[in-house]
Amino acid sequence: MEVCYQLPVLPLDRPVPKHVLSRRGAISFSSSSSLFGAPDPRQLAQVKPSSLCRRGAISYDSSDQTALYIRMLGDVRVRSQVGFQPDRRGSHPYLGIDFRTLHAHAESTGSIPARRIRRLFSFQRHLLSSRFLRGAPHLNPLHILDEDYCGQAKCMLEKVGSWNFDIFLFDRLTNGNSLVTLTLYLLSHYGLIELFQLDMVKVHRFLVLVQEDYHNHNPYHNAVHAADVTQAMHCYLKEPKLAKSLTSCDILLGLLAAATHDLDHPGVNQPFLIKTNHYLAVLYRNTSVLENHHWRSAVGLLRETELLSHLPAEDRLTMERQLGSLILATDISRQNEYLSKFRTHLDQEDLCLGNASHRHFILQMALKCADICNPCRPWELSKQWSEKVTEEFFHQGDIEKKHKLEVSPLCDSENNSIADVQIGFMTYVVEPLFAEWARFSDTRLSQTMLGHLCLNKASWNAMQPEASGSSEEPESEPEPSSRALPQGSLQS
């Protein structure tokens, strides 16, 4: 099925509307440009410098009245008198341009039918993506990423199952496209693209839209966090108990839930949305507001891209519901509910992964662990995440002070420190959850995570002005709640 949007034709040399640029770039090509026939060097040399700065809006011919809407995916290079000029504003490292649709006036006819051109573009995207997944070398000399960066990123993907995986470095190597690149690789790694007969064009489009719908101005809840959670989910899916029990559908749902679990996160928590009468709080009746929004946003993108449109309608609806069940499990206000159920199953030793409902519950617990696993990472990574989440926390407090609102717990930078926030979060939220996970899956990975958690907690304790044992309170006193701490509380 062809991907086609009915967007208006833009006259040349006119600023591209913001609502278009928010999700799609715009370029206008002459009918004699290299896309439609032999290139005209004189026209290529006449590209205006000002148009190169217009977020991907480039005019080749002032007399052209045909606008081609595209998504700028990566390092688009335009030949001018001084050579190739890169524009790194894209959102995908492996494709140059993802063509959406061709718009032309009814009276204008080209030498090549528009439908044939769209098919050509679609095939070109499929060919490039297939070459990457097969590991084949690029035939196009205009590499989207520098060779060394691309090579390093591929080397990192070979070790994507390592708990020491540095998602920050990977994000830099992929030009800010860690979520798209990582998720695409994992879908291919598990054979899900072939098994579910997914259209590569739709897969790319879905992942790019997901990445773009995360807010990069959020210090913590952004696409890099989603990529980190997806990588952690992959590590858990490899654990022996899960690897031999989960179905391909379970794995697909787990990866999709990890990639979309914080989709369109506003960078503030649920109590903030409620006390400011935000429309999302009203829409979801103050219940799992953010998680419901993440789920509905993910379903919206699945339907917009028609990623699963070839599956029977009943199967699609079932997958959408299960996706929602996984994402809703990340609501920290329900932490005790899930932890108590998990502990009961382990005490009674009645978990049977041959049972579909039990497998789904374990996927929920795996996603919960992946979502708050930052304190269990090596110190160099854990410390960066702690600083980012606390920055986001304190930013919410600054907004509340500015508008004369009651400052949310742990959001006051004057009365809280990063060490205070992290020690409390580790004690009352992370340790109880990962202790039970280690009971369920007593592996080297589980022991590694608990070891890092212990060392990281000791490091934060050492940073407190007056180090004392006050943070080591019995687990039976304060229970984890939406007041309890950073990563979780920002999600609820």
Image (tube, rainbow, N blue to C red):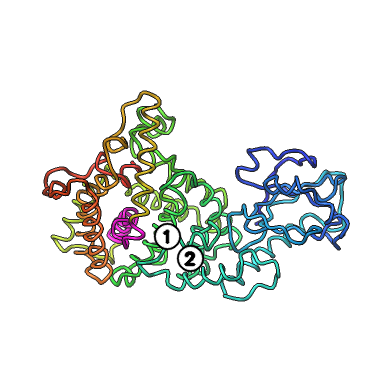
Left/right of residue 169 with respect to residue 64 in the rendered view: left
Q: Which residue is mark 2?
A: 187
Specify the quadrant that holds the N terminus. Answer: bottom right
Q: Is residue 163 above or below residue 325?
A: below
Which residue is nearer to you in this view: 144 or 70?
144
Specify the quadrant that holds the C terminus. Answer: top left
Q: How many marks?
A: 2
Q: Residue at x 13, y 60 (%)?
A: 347
The residue under label 1 is which amino acid type? Leu
Q: Could you tell me how far apart the alpha carbons at marks 2 and 1 are, in whole angstroms?
A: 8 Å
Q: Which residue is mark 1?
A: 255
Q: Residue at x 69, y 64 (%)?
A: 123
Instruction: Provide residue 146's location: percent of width, then percent of height.
Output: 61, 67
Q: Residue at x 87, y 47 (%)?
A: 108
Q: Is mark 2 in CB contact (under 8 Å) with mark 1? A: yes
| Structural crowding at the residue carrying mark 2, measured as other residues with C-alpha within 10 Å and reported as few (<14), some (14–19) or many (≥20) | some
Q: Is residue 239 magenta?
A: no
Instruction: Provide residue 364's location: percent of width, then percent of height.
Output: 31, 55
Magenta range is 357-382
Q: Residue at x 46, y 73 (%)?
A: 158
Instruction: Provide residue 447's location: percent of width, then percent of height.
Output: 23, 67
| Structural crowding at the residue carrying mark 1, measured as other residues with C-alpha within 10 Å and reported as few (<14), some (14–19) or many (≥20) | many
Which residue is nearer to you in this view: 381 or 9?
381
Q: Main secondary structure of the magenta part?
A: helix
Left/right of residue 296 with respect to residue 150 in the rendered view: left
Q: For residue 449, what is the image quadrant?
A: bottom left
Which residue is nearer to you in this view: 207 or 154?
154
Q: Secondary structure at mark 2?
A: helix
Left/right of residue 491 with respect to residue 22 in the rendered view: left
The residue under label 2 is which amino acid type? Leu
The numbered mark, 2 or 1, whose residue comes first in the sequence reads 2
Tag shown at residue 416: none
